[in-house]
Image: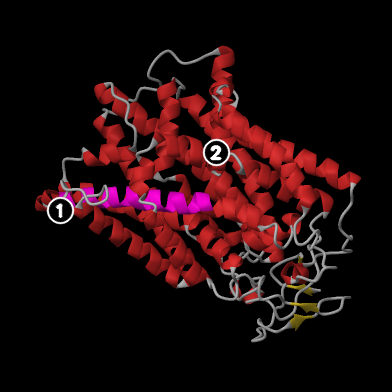
Amino acid sequence: MRTSPSNNIALDLPSSPTRDHLAPSIAHDNASPVDLSPRLHNRDLAPTKVEGRRWGGYSIFALWTNDVHNIANYSFAIGLYALGLGGWQILLSLGIGAALVYFFMNLSGYMGQKTGVPFPVISRISFGIHGAQIPALIRAVIAIAWFGIQTYLASVVFRVLLTAIHPGFADYDHNSILGLSSLGWVCFVAIWAVQLAILAYGMEMVRRYEAFAGPVILVTVAALAAWMFVQADASIAWSIREPLSGGEMWRQIFAGGALWLAIYGTLILNFCDFARSSPCRRTIKVGNFWGLPVNILVFAGITVLLCGAQFQINGKIIESPTEIIASIPNTFFLVLGCLAFLIVTVAVNIMANFVAPAFVLSNLAPKYLTFRRAGLISATLAVLILPWNLYNSPLVIVYFLSGLGALLGPLYGVIMVDYWLLRKGRINVPELYSEHPQGTYFYSRGVNLRAVAAFIPAALIAIVLALVPGFASISPFSWLIGASLAGLLYLIIAKRQPYYADVSGESIAVDNIGH
């Protein structure tokens, strides 16, 4: 078992470089060699080696800074203000959500850091080497759809920026080609190409871009809040009406916290794609602490300040910070504001909606699809679905994407219970890449039917709670209910029908398959 000097836990990866990542077989401690299947392994899906782990505490903090302060999150938090929650109630609601996200994100991150493998490979532990395609594809479909939508939203900001610089560009914004104007197509393709260029250089370029974008958006929203505070003569409205009280107040507070958790349901599931490149648990814990609870509370404070100041000025409730930016009388500062939100929207889109499908599609055909090729395919699919039409269709957003989103909680419940409660973190990493019928994760023809049996009923219940109007009062809690139910069902089934051999000690060390 190898140990890193900067890490007190046993690592599953070799500390010395090797050029044998495509070797036909690998040896691990106290076991015979394991054959690497070309249907399960390539360089991008292999465990991250110690020397390749560059996602430090700041990198993780910057990652979450971008995601927390994105436009969609501000729209959600502003919605709490519009519901009648006062300043302290919004802070409490988002604080509860932050604590939940921090706890669940750490569980997922520790798992990725210890094994060094991406989400599609992590899923093989509980769903089987082939059954893992179920959670991976669900995550990928959601990500591809939202990648297209977020790229479109970023292009809208880009259009505002261009017309602010040169009003004549607005002349090209009135026609329609497949639902988008000429200027709209130029902006969309430009943003699409920038994101593709960043991904072409791999995860290291993603880390650098996220590190650059984090401070940009933090400084921008802080400056915007300060400017609005001055505009409101240093006085803000802490609520828009008589604040809620009693049972309804507490229901809205906890519902807001639960919804915040559901918003992060996608990244909670595949945070291992990033955490696999962190050197130790402490890095994840510290980076997540500053990036999630602390950052979210700062975000909540800025939201209250923006909403309260705007309401104090003219009695109106904004829907997004971009409305404030668009009203800035100075063209120079308007452009800077648009540019900052453009930078962060790209950063969020890459981390939340580009990395996941790239790994997933690579996992479908590892022999032919590298991370870059898979990323190009997913980006192309995001264009072909004409995402602006999806965004403008409430039925698609509510029933299709929200329905798929309801499946994320049950998937998380199964994966976490299997890893933490049943296996207690003991994983045979080499056999995650083996198709041998006696392999630890082969189960029944490569599918763990127990995981599927626990997932299906929990998923159906989560979808009903999320989409059926009669359950509107508890729909915000559908992610938590789905995850808890799936985890409990899986625990019961697995305890009654044991299916895996115990692996003594820590996870089995890997030779010659890392990258």
Which percent across, then down, holds residue 146?
44, 49
Q: Is residue 149 magenta?
A: yes
Amino acid type at circle 2 is Gly
Q: Which of the image's four quarters has the C terminus?
A: bottom right
Q: Main secondary structure of the magenta part?
A: helix
Counting other residues with Cα less than 10 Å from the Cα at mark 2, is it few (<14), some (14-19), or many (20 or more)?
Answer: many
Amino acid type at circle 1 is Ile
Which percent across, then down, holds residue 495?
88, 45
Sequence-wise, the earlier of marks 2 and 1 is 1
What label does residue 10 carry, if any?
none
Q: In which image quadrant can residue 228 be found?
A: top left
Residue drawn at (74%, 67%), measured in percent from left and top?
A: 432
| Horizontal side of residue 125 vs 274, given as left or right | right
> Residue furthest toward the bottom?
19
In this view, the residue in front, 337 or 146, is: 146
Residue drawn at (16%, 44%), measured in percent from left and top?
A: 330
Counting other residues with Cα less than 10 Å from the Cα at mark 1, is it few (<14), some (14-19), or many (20 or more)?
Answer: some
What span is in magenta? 141-164
Closer to us: mark 2 or mark 1? Answer: 2
| Horizontal side of residue 185 vs 410, given as left or right | left
Residue marked by disc 1: 165
Say whether marks 2 and 1 touch (CB < 8 Å). no
Q: Is residue 421 magenta?
A: no
Q: Which of the image's four quarters has the N terminus?
A: bottom right
| Horizontal side of residue 489 vs 390, given as left or right | right
Q: In which image quadrant can residue 29 be found?
A: bottom right
Residue drawn at (41%, 67%), measured in percent from left and top?
A: 198
Q: In which image quadrant can residue 40 be found?
A: bottom right
Res 337 visible: no
Residue marked by disc 2: 403
